Structures are given as C-alpha cells and as structure tokens.
Amino acid sequence: MELTDFKTIVADYKVIFFDAFGVLKTYNGLIPGIQKTFSYLKENNKDFYVLTNDASRSPEQLAESYHRMGLTDIVPDCIISSGMLAREYLELKVNHGTVAYLGTEDSAHYIETAGLTTLSIRELSLESISEVNALVLLDDEGFDWNTDLNKTVNLLRKRNIPVIVANTDETYPVSKNRIAIAIGGLAEMIETIVAKRFIRFGKPDAQMFIFAYEHIRNAPSIHKKDILMVGDTLHTDIIGGNKFGLDTALVLTGNTQAEDAEIRIRSTGIIPTYICESAVIE
C-alpha cells in the first residue's frame, strides 16, 4: 500500500471537500496539527468545505464547536450538512401541517428554518396525529429510546406520511474501542418494522455531492477534476466521491486504520485515488 503526502496532493486541486469525523476531529478533539492544513489552504487560495452527515446541530453551531476546539477557519458558510438537504426537501414537498421529529431541539433547526411547525416525538400524542404530515429522523439523542421509538412505530402504522432520514450513518465512534448507534441505524430498524421505505440524505448519496457542488463559491468556473474529496470511510466518503466523479483521498486517522486499509480496499473494491496518513499539512 503506497502512501502519498497530503500536501503534494492538495497542490493539484482548487477545492477540497473534507469529511468531519475521523478527518478533522475524533472523540478526543481535533486531529493534532489540522489547523496547519487550513492555514495552508487559505494562504494558497484553496477553497474548502466540510461535508458532514451530522444533522444534530445547525451549521452555525457546528462551526462554533470547531472554534471552541481552536479551528477558527471553519465558518458556517463552509459547512454542508445532510440536514440542509432534508430542509430543502421539506420546503419543496411539505407545505402545511406539522413535522414530527426524532432528535434534539438543536437538530430541529433544519425544520424550523423551512418555516414549518415542529413537534418532538417526545411531545407527540398518538391520539392527535391528524396534522402530522411528515416525520424527520435527525439525531440519536433528545428522546426516550423505549417510549418514543415505540411511539414512532405506531405513528407510522397509523399515518402514511413521508419519513426523512437526515443522517445515513449507522454508527459513530465514542471511544477508541466503542461505537454508538446513529440515527441511520435506527432508521433501518424502524423501516423494517413498518415495512416502508424512507427518504435518506447524506453521503454516499449523489444528492449530497450535487448539493455541495452547487454551493461552491466559484461554482461556474470549478469542474469536478478541480475537487478532491477527503474522507476516512470507504463506504460513505470514498465511494460517494468516486461515484460523483471526484478524485478521493482516504486518510488513516478515523474509521479506516493503517493495519487493515489494504484488506478493506481489496474486499470492497472501493478504490481511493490516494491514501494518506492524515490530512495534516506540516
């Protein structure tokens, strides 16, 4: 397995798409030295965006979380969240009634900014659901897993409404050796129980990359060959970038570790353009 220096790669691109968890940060905080990467990108007029399946907070809140960790170059305008795609769908397809949601009050930002009435599953009464015209699965926190998941299942048995999954991730790491179930994993379970298909937004789906491409500041003059997708996960970041026609760089600081990267690449057939130790530029 041949590793390539990240700085050498970046020189050939105008725009860099970064995954968040495992590339810029982990459960311990920022990847050590990642601030240097963004200083280099700004000094060399490279445009950058963070493409994240995290719909738990607004772009403003996500940017603030980076600022608190010491990475001040990430601002709300350069964060592209799967929650933003969910909001766009709601604006186009749900124009009245109430949207119920699984998640925190912060995650409900994406529904509220679409001008819709929101209702947490926690506050929903199954006796008064006639006005509920959509359900959005936003985050794995903010509700009682037993009571509210059962309530969700029964809502969907009684109401034939669209269900939007704003984060396709099935799990996320909470320590070096432990993972937690993400809202995408819950969505799959509920989908099986109610025998319905949900609408999903986030990597690796093409909509995420189309949406990001449309939000590039100099979009008319930027072509796919000018963009590099940097991620730590073959099944989301790398295959999503590959399918959209972007060059991809797999970094070994997150879900894919150096000791098993080659085996995973061979077994999945998902081949990154480059493999790098990290996204840090010294």
Image (tube, helix red, strand yellow):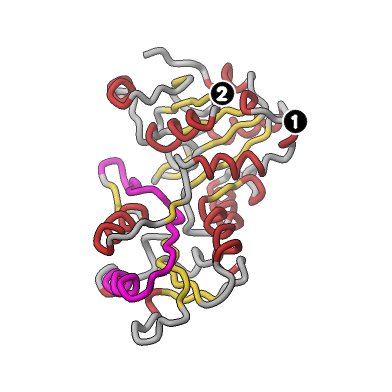
Q: Which image quarter: residue 216?
A: top right
**Could you tell me the amino acid type at mark 2?**
Glu
Relative height, residue 202 to residue 195 (above, below) = above
Relative height, residue 39 to residue 274 (above, below) = below
Left or right: where 26 falls relative to 158: right
Evaluate if marks 2 and 1 touch, with contact meaning CB atoms under 8 Å apart. Answer: no
Residue displayed at 40% across by 28% down = 252
Q: Residue furthest top?
A: 2
Q: Which residue is mark 2?
A: 282
State yes or no: residue 170 in magenta: yes
- Quarter of the picture containing the C terminus is top right
Q: Position of residue 36 (x, y in %)?
A: 59, 31
State yes or no: residue 185 in magenta: no
Residue nearest the observer in this picture, 268 or 157? 157
Residue nearest the observer in this picture, 212 or 52? 212
Left or right: where 204 falls relative to 7: left
Residue displayed at 57% across by 45% down = 70
Mark 2 lies on a secondary structure that is loop
Q: Position of residue 181 (x, y in %)?
A: 30, 53
**Could you tell me the amino acid type at mark 1?**
Ser
Residue displayed at 47% across by 20% down = 274
Q: Position of residue 257 (x, y in %)?
A: 33, 28
Q: Position of residue 277 (x, y in %)?
A: 43, 23
- Quarter of the picture containing the N terminus is top left
Residues rendered magenta in the picture = 148-177
Q: Which image quarter: residue 84?
A: bottom right
Front of the two marks 2 and 1 = 1
* First in residue order: circle 2 vs circle 1: 1
Q: CA distance from mark 2 to mark 1?
A: 29 Å
Mark 1 lies on a secondary structure that is helix
Q: Which residue is mark 1?
A: 221
Within-10-Å neighbours for mark 1: few <14, some 14–19, many 20+: few
